[in-house]
Image (tube, rainbow, N blue to C red):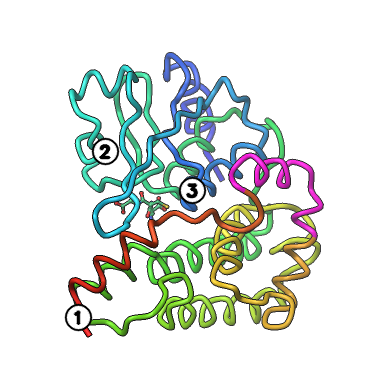
């Protein structure tokens, strides 16, 4: 519960920000998609958080590299398109405030925007009940911390090329499938208890914003949701029937995660590093 003082500060923050926030994202970035789903489902006015797409290329291993957009004032200030100059982690999403401060990591970005909103705006994405709120956060954390990093294509490519991991197609690599199945298996059991129409109860929550991008990745890995994870699959169908969500997916590459690595470059790199 926020104290009156905190509530006042929160309200002021919206004015103190002195202008709109900017979210640097890319349509092929599943972590960015969490924030975008949050913004749209939460009905945050687009003028409050303006979207700026990074550019995208691949390195000689076929691994995606996100770069600062050409001509952007921030790129000009940096004097380079290298994202590492903008965010030491070199990752997106990045939230830029008008005073130049930057926040990274999808969860803290969402929490910060949420804290800056005055109460009563749009649809609230956390339930009132403390246990249900914890369930929402549990599913979000499983997706962000225990699933996404282990099924991440750049990680798989590098492990095959440089650390002698078994060579297999990156998208359906056994390590990737193992972690998706392990964590989706856990979430399937959790959701049997807490899901209603959506991941937790009958309202869209942050859990759904974190689950959706991972489902897109699981579909890219050719996992059959309906036979392996029937509860997740049922919730997914319900989510797809929500107009806001289907429009976001349409705008950001579809129901299946768009392919974000260069398979030809990867083949050359993998052969060079692991000659048969
Ligand atoms: N835990 C981070 C994950 C961010 C992340 O891995 N972003 C990917 C795109 S989905 C990225 O920028 N990768 C580029 C790189 O690792 O160099 C978050 O939740 O924001």
In the rendered image, the vertical position of residue 16 relative to residue 124, given as above or below: above
Q: Nearer the viewer, residue 103 or 22?
A: 22
Residue with the mark numbered 2 = 83
The picture places residue 197, in percent across and down from the top left corner, at: 80, 62
* Quarter-of-image position of residue 198: bottom right
Q: Is mark 3 within 8 Å of ligand 1?
A: yes
Circle nearer the viewer, 1 or 3: 1
Residue at the spot x=74%, y=75% of the render?
Answer: 231
Q: Nearer the viewer, residue 25 or 264?
A: 264
Circle nearer the viewer, 1 or 2: 1
Q: CA distance from mark 1 to mark 2?
A: 33 Å
- The magenta segment is 238-253
Q: Secondary structure at mark 3?
A: loop
Q: Is mark 2 within 8 Å of ligand 1?
A: yes
Left or right of 57 in this view: 158: left
Q: Secondary structure at mark 2?
A: helix
Residue at the spot x=25%, y=48% of the render?
Answer: 89
Residue with the mark numbered 3 = 28
Q: Secondary structure at mark 1?
A: loop
Residue at the spot x=39%, y=35% of the render?
Answer: 54
Q: Indicate yes or no whether the magenta region holds residue 43.
A: no
Residue with the mark numbered 1 = 275
* Quarter-of-image position of residue 137: bottom right
Q: CA distance from mark 2 to mark 3?
A: 16 Å
Q: On the rendered image, what quadrant is the C terminus found in? A: bottom left
Q: Main secondary structure of the magenta part?
A: helix
Residue at the spot x=19%, y=80% of the render?
Answer: 275
Left or right of 147 in this view: 202: right
Instruction: Give the class, few, some or many, for how many residues have Cα within 10 Å of label 1's Cα (few <14, many ≥20).
Output: few
Q: Nearer the viewer, residue 8 or 108?
A: 108
The picture places residue 140, in percent across and down from the top left corner, at: 53, 61
Instruction: Give the class, few, some or many, for how many residues have Cα within 10 Å of label 2's Cα (few <14, many ≥20).
Output: many
């Amino acid at each position: 519960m926020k104290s009156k003082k905190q509530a006042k500060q929160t309200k002021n923050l919206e004015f103190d920000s002195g202008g709109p926030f900017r979210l640097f994202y890319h349509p092929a970035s599943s972590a960015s998609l969490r924030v975008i789903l949050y913004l749209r489902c939460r009905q945050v006015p687009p003028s409050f958080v303006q979207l700026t797409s990074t550019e995208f290329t691949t390195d000689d291993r076929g691994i995606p590299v996100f770069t600062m957009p050409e001509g952007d004032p921030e790129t000009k200030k940096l004097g380079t398109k290298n994202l590492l100059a903008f965010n030491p982690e070199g990752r997106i999403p990045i939230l830029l405030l008008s005073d130049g401060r930057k926040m990274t990591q999808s969860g803290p970005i969402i929490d910060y925007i949420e804290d800056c909103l005055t109460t009563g705006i749009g649809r609230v994405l956390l339930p009132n009940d403390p246990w249900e709120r914890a369930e929402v956060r549990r599913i979000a954390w499983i997706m962000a911390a225990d699933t996404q990093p282990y099924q991440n294509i750049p990680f798989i490519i590098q492990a095959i090329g440089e650390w002698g991991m078994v060579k297999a197609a990156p998208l359906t690599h056994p390590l990737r499938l193992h972690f998706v199945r392990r964590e989706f298996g856990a979430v399937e059991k959790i959701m049997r208890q807490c899901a209603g129409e959506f991941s937790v109860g009958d309202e869209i929550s942050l859990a759904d914003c974190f689950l959706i991008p991972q489902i897109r990745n699981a579909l890219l890995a050719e996992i059959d949701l309906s036979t392996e994870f029937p509860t997740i699959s049922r919730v997914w169908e319900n989510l797809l029937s929500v107009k806001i969500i289907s429009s976001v997916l349409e705008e950001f590459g579809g129901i299946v995660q768009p392919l974000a690595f260069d398979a030809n470059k990867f083949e050359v790199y993998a052969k060079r590093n692991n000659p048969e």
